[in-house]
Image: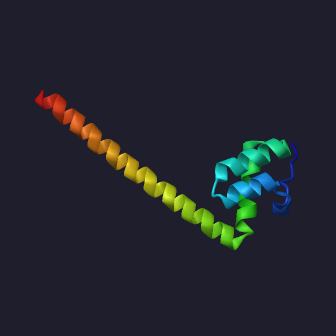
Amino acid sequence: MSSKPRRSTDLPKAAVEALRHGNLIEAIKVVRQEGNVGFKEAKEVVEAHIASQPTLKKKMDKVLVTAQQKFVRWMVGFLVLAAGAVLLMMLG
């Protein structure tokens, strides 16, 4: 493992493509595998690349907001179902 993070321009093409599709986790995996670096360093390299690309940063921010909204909807649905199950058990 190198002690110095790679420059954002050294991002592998597969990682850039993953980011274009909004897949941050896949981009980090590619950097880890192709750069033979640990998770922290790979994450820093990917984040540096995103920070250097304003349009990509805006897209990744939107991806994050969408993921958070989906998670909240899923949790609300789960809680409604759980409350319904508890109510049925109490009535039954």
Q: Give the total number of marks visible in the rendering.
A: 0
Location of residue 31 with respect to 21 vertically, above or below: above
Q: Is residue 37 left or right of residue 90?
A: right
**x, y percent for residue 65:** 51, 61
**x, y percent for residue 20:** 68, 61
Q: Quadrant of residue 45?
A: bottom right
**x, y percent for residue 54:** 69, 73
The residue sitting at 31% across, 43% down in the picture is: 79
Quarter placement of the C terminus: top left
* Colouring: rainbow
**x, y percent for residue 8:** 81, 61
The residue sitting at 72% across, 49% down in the picture is: 28
Q: Is residue 86 left or right of residue 55?
A: left
Nearest the viewer among 5 and 12 is: 12
The residue sitting at 80% across, 42% down in the picture is: 33
Quarter placement of the N terminus: top right
Outermost residue, top side: 92
The residue sitting at 14% across, 30% down in the picture is: 90
Q: Quadrant of residue 81?
A: top left
